[in-house]
């Protein structure tokens, strides 16, 4: 039995760090295990311009623990008013790595997102031209579409038309939750990849709703049926270069989760690598863990893989059930299964 596993240092291709006190409280948990992360721009107000991305990057760097070499990969929040020239300049200077598309109203702080996709066509054309990838929150917001179908409908109504209009645009379907998305990614021969979260490999919708409602398992896109979780596990553990880790670790205080209208998000930064090692071992695929966490992402983004390494040892991890922040406690995702791997 393997007792220890050394892989190239992982990256997180989808992460919420927030700002201020929350940023300072959560950042060390990611910086401990990950070399780089794609930083989500859904602050209030959102990170729309190059100047805002630069200022946010500065705040992240100032919040890093002493001696950390973590690199935040910044993104811009796409709006119908995004200036293609400002975006291209932020890309040319190396400041931003991707642009994030939120359909307006799809999730936390997405009110300034895109309602009319035709309006962003010139920006998408520019992105295709300069090789700047588009990260998508893939859910329609049409209230007549059932929340469990919103990802599959997004593929048909929004994503496929965008990809047909801009075939050179490099797209990342973020935090996919369905077998439909897995199949769609596999059907594309180029310019399409997907991130998968830690929590969607672990929970299905029963975890949220059966035997009492569990707000800490509520996230967006919401976890789906078991057959979809199994499709995600198969994709993640397959070694297929089009699938890689984006934790979507999304801290909210317990006070904001445990409400009549609670926030969406699972906070997985402290225990993600232990959970993933467990999942990959359960699938007899520990030899593909490195591809998922450390190779496929940089390969798709055209970035070098990390030279440093991370070692997991077969030992029960110790991580807190919550972290304290000046804004209040934030509950750490409960994988509901014993974990047997720790980051050493
Ligand atoms: O669960 C989620 N939380 N999904 C998102 O898309 C946004 C995120 C957040 O910012 O809290
Ligand atoms: Zn997210």
Image: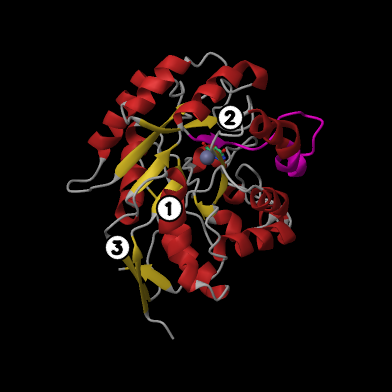
Circle 3 SS class: strand
For disc 2, the marked residue is: 102
Asked whether, in this view, residue 52 is left or right of residue 231, the answer is left
Queried whether the magenta region covers residue 92, the answer comes back as: no
Question: In the picture, which quadrant includes the C terminus?
Answer: bottom left
Q: Is residue 174 visible in this depiction of the protein?
A: no
- Disc 2 C-beta below 8 A from ligand 1: yes
Along the line of sight, the residue nearer the viewer: 48 or 108: 48
Q: Seen in the image, is 25 located left or right of residue 125?
A: left
Dot 2 crowding, Cα within 10 Å, few <14, some 14–19, many 20+: many
Q: Earlier in the sequence, mark 3 or mark 2?
A: 2
Image point 70% across, 36% down: which residue? 160
Q: Quadrant of ligand 1?
A: top right
The residue that mark 1 highlights is 322
State the image quarter where residue 273 is shown: bottom left
Which residue is painted at 56% across and 65% down in the image? 237
Residue 170 lies, in percent from the top left, at 53, 37
């Amino acid at each position: 039995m393997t007792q220890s596993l050394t892989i190239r240092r992982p990256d997180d291709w989808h992460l919420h760090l927030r700002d201020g006190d929350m940023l300072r409280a959560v950042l060390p948990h990611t910086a401990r295990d990950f070399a780089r992360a794609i930083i989500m721009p859904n602050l209030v107000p959102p990170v729309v311009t190059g100047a805002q991305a630069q200022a946010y990057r500065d705040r992240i760097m100032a919040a890093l623990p002493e001696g950390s070499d973590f690199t935040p990969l910044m993104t811009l929040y796409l709006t119908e008013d995004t200036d293609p020239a400002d975006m291209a300049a932020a890309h040319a200077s190396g400041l931003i790595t991707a642009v994030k598309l939120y359909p307006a109203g799809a999730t936390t702080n997405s009110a300034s997102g895109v309602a009319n996709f035709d309006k962003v066509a010139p920006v998408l054309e520019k992105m295709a031209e300069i090789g700047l990838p588009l990260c998508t929150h893939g859910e329609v917001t049409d209230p007549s579409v059932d929340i469990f179908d919103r990802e599959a409908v997004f593929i048909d109504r929004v994503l496929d038309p965008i990809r047909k209009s801009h075939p050179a645009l490099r797209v990342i379907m973020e935090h996919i939750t369905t077998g439909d998305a897995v199949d769609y990614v596999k059907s594309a021969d180029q310019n399409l990849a997907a991130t998968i979260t830690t929590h969607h490999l672990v929970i299905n919708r029963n975890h949220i709703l059966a035997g009492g409602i569990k707000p800490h398992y509520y996230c967006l896109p919401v976890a789906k049926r078991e057959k979809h979780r199994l499709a995600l596990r198969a994709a993640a553990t397959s070694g297929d270069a089009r699938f890689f880790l984006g934790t979507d670790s999304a801290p909210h205080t317990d006070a904001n989760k445990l409400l009549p209208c609670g926030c969406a998000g699972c906070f997985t930064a402290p225990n993600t690598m232990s959970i993933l090692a467990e999942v990959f071992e359960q699938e007899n695929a520990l030899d593909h863990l490195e591809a998922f966490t450390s190779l496929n992402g940089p390969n798709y983004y055209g970035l070098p893989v990390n030279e440093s390494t991370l070692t997991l040892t077969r030992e029960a991890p110790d991580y807190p059930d919550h972290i304290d922040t000046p804004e209040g406690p934030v509950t750490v995702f409960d994988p509901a299964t014993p974990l047997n791997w720790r980051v050493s």
